[in-house]
Image (cartoon, rainbow, N blue to C red):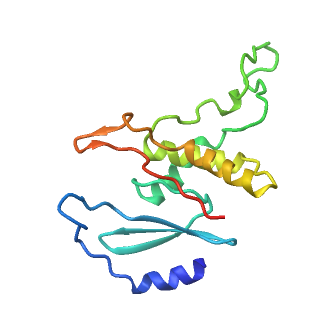
Amino acid sequence: SVKDAKQTVKDVNVLNVPFNEKTTLTDLHIMVSDSKESIVIETDESGFNIYDNVFNVLTNNPNFPYHTYNVSNYMTLDNNEIINSINPKVNLNKYSLGLSSFGLPGDYSSPSRFVRAFFNKSKVVFPEDNNKRVITYFKLLDSVSIIKGCVKTSNGYHYSRYASCFS
């Protein structure tokens, strides 16, 4: 449970040692959730930081407090049919479905993927059938996965290597 995780993390020591010489150290970003609550555990120079996670999503750097602030920039995103709120007296063309989500970030940066994951998870309609729920879950993950070749660093390509689900 999240309660257990909060207690257990107090006894964890993180070492500044890579697994091997080919593996670089990265910051830890861990999400722990149960049926009642969710937390994010991150490390920095001061040690472990535990944050309540009302968003129920997580991406990596920047740190979780940044993501919780940044998501406020997108609070007007919606999934409803768009209305003309600029000036209803002017007849504007609703030329496409999904216009109320215009501005939803689509790039591969962590802040954009956090916002996209939160929006999609907030709006998704999970089916009753468990097999269909699992398929829907993977579609959510696909909406924030990074395709190999789209993000190149000095160490090679950064991409989503796997996805998992426990039902």
| Position of 8 relative to 75 (above/below) | below
User: Would you say residue 69 is visible in this rendering?
Assistant: yes
- Residue 58 image point, x, y percent: 52, 57
Residue visible at 82% across and 16% down? 89
Q: Is residue 42 left or right of residue 157?
A: right
| Position of 7 relative to 49 (above/below) | below
| Position of 54 relative to 103 (above/below) | below
Q: Is residue 24 left or right of residue 151?
A: left
- Residue 120 image point, x, y percent: 65, 45
Quadrant for the N terminus, please: bottom right
Q: Is residue 162 left or right of residue 21?
A: right
- Residue 79 image point, x, y percent: 73, 37
User: Would you say residue 72 is visible in this rendering?
Assistant: no
Q: Which quadrant of the view contains residue 86? A: top right
Extreme residue toward the front, this view: 131
Q: Which quadrant of the view contains residue 92? A: top right
Q: How many marks?
A: 0
Q: Which quadrant of the view contains residue 167? A: bottom right
Of residues 84 and 40, the one nearer the viewer is 40
| Position of 118 relative to 43 (above/below) | above
Residue visible at 45% across and 81% down? 9
Residue visible at 23% across and 45% down? 155
- Residue 41 image point, x, y percent: 46, 69
Residue visible at 64% across and 44% down? 75
Of residues 140 and 135, the one nearer the viewer is 135
Extreme residue toward the left, this view: 21
Of residues 84 and 10, the one nearer the viewer is 10
